[in-house]
Amino acid sequence: MAKKNQPHTLVVGGTRGIGRAVMEALVEAGHKVSVIGRRPVATGWPKSVRVWQADLAQAGSLPPLLSEILKVNGPLQSLVFLQRFRGEGDSWQGEMEVSLNATRVLIELAQDKFSPRQSNAIVILGSIAAQLVAEEQPLGYHVVKGALRQLGRYYACTLGPKGIRVNCVSPGVILKPEAENFYRVNKDVATLYERIAPLRRFGTAAEVAGVVRFLCGPDSAFITGQDIVVDGGVSLVWQASLARQLVPIKENQAVVPPRSGTRLRRR
């Protein structure tokens, strides 16, 4: 049974990985959580969490879906977007519809459906692929993640007068349960990543979820329009410095490495 004045958070794309960790973190923080997911949920979910299955690419289905969620669980305090395209077909079009357009549509529909509290929040999961190129991800993923960051900044300005804060959280490489087997098989890749990351380890889904929970709570009541990078500092490291770390330097030659931007003369 819901507690009086219990905050209601809608998590979009919250059935696996970081999404599930966000759901668990918010339940632990006392939130009433609604989830929109593409697939049925796995076992072991809290009975208090209601899940609605939906295809986010079908924008016309979103107004009645949101109305039903609000009718069942009441006005929102927080809205969290974690979805991405994982279907078949054109990944460009899929990312545009599922990740970008569905976010825009749901924000427009929900902007007047928040509870009259001081700390209402929208959190959008981005990626460091908004700034850097991750060759294992398609073009559409990169473009959409960059667009979502600017979308968050836009709504932070336009929804601020309504008392709604909008922020992004951009993870780097996160060791999610479904990726553990890959790194177990490819131990050299895991070891190399841990070597180049300033914190010398992978991040976890729970650590990303902790940042999302913070942004959905009253302790972040004066934070809006920000993109918080959660990558253990790896995006701070200059590529040339990484090269010198990973390749042995011959002491009898260039004792002092050239400065950044130095042009090497060809002989």
Image (cartoon, rainbow, N blue to C red):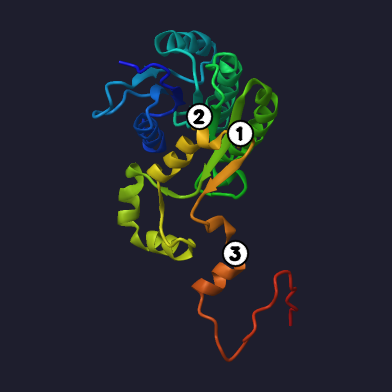
Disc 3 marks a residue whose amino acid type is Gln
Q: Quadrant of the C terminus?
A: bottom right
Q: For marks 2 and 3, give the CA distance.
A: 31 Å
Disc 2 marks a residue whose amino acid type is Phe
Res. 215 visible in picture: no
Horizontal and vertical percent for residue 28?
Answer: 34, 33
Q: Is 74 left, or right, of 152 in this rendering?
A: left
Residue nearest the viewer, comparing 150 with 217: 217
Q: Is residue 86 above or below residue 250?
A: above
Q: Residue at x 62, y 47 (%)?
A: 131
Toward which corner of the image does residue 118 lie, by quadrant?
top right
| Residue where numbered disc 3 is placed | 239
The residue most toward the left is: 44
Q: Residue at x 60, y 41 (%)?
A: 227
Q: Is 12 left, or right, of 165 in this rendering?
A: left
Q: For marks 1 and 2, give the CA distance.
A: 10 Å
Residue nearest the viewer, comparing 41 with 22: 22
Q: Residue 81, which numbered label?
A: 2
Disc 1 marks a residue whose amino acid type is Leu
Crowd rating for badge 1 (residues with CA inside 10 Å; few <14, some 14–19, many 20+): many
Mark 2 or 3 closer to N-term? 2
| Residue where numbered disc 1 is placed | 148
Horizontal and vertical percent for residue 90?
Answer: 53, 30
Mark 1 or 2 closer to N-term? 2
| Of marks 2 and 3, the one in the foreground | 2
Mark 2 and mark 3 residues within 8 Å of each other at the beta carbon: no
Q: Residue 80, which numbered label?
A: none
